[in-house]
Image (cartoon, helix red, strand yellow):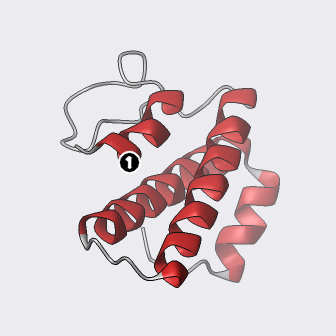
Amino acid sequence: MSDLVTEEDLARARIDPEFRLEFMAGKLEMLLEALNKMRRASDTQPEAARQIREGVDLAVKLADRLQQKGGPRRLSSPDGSLPSSEYPINRLVPSILVGS
């Protein structure tokens, strides 16, 4: 999945519920990876802390939407080993705060 969201992606997400869930799940995983990189960088600047807080807030909102919509069929752990039933979305967000 590309880092950029295209107009085609947005149009398809509006009409295809299954694609929308997979698309949102993919973007959530990308966001969590970026937040983990920022956290590991140990940047103590206030701007970095603010960006991490905003990213976590966004990740929580996105995870909530995915859960309300039934979630993707398969959302793996960061190493790709566990299916979503064993690695629920609501466990993803806290993992960025405690480390992986």
Where residue 82 appears, as percent x and y from the top left, is 26, 26
Residue drawn at 41 percent across, 63 percent down = 35
Residue 73 visible (yes or no): no
Q: Nearer the viewer, residue 51 or 1?
A: 51
Residue drawn at 47 percent across, 78 percent down = 48
57 displayed left or right of 34: right
Q: Is residue 83 above or below residue 27?
A: above
Q: Residue furthest top?
A: 85
Where residue 86 appears, as percent x and y from the top left, is 35, 16
Residue drawn at 45 percent across, 29 percent down = 91
Secondary structure beneath label 1: helix
Q: Quadrant of residue 30?
A: bottom left
86 displayed left or right of 22: left
Q: Residue furthest right?
A: 14
Q: Quadrant of residue 84?
A: top left
Residue drawn at 73 percent across, 31 percent down = 69
Q: Which residue is mark 1?
A: 96
79 displayed left or right of 11: left
Where residue 33 appears, as percent x and y from the top left, is 35, 60
Q: Nearer the viewer, residue 86 or 21?
A: 86
- Determine crowd level at label 1: few under 14, some 14-19, many 20+ residues with C-alpha closer than 10 A: some
Quarter holding the C terminus is top left
Q: Amino acid at mark 1?
A: Ile
Q: Is residue 41 above or below residue 58?
A: below
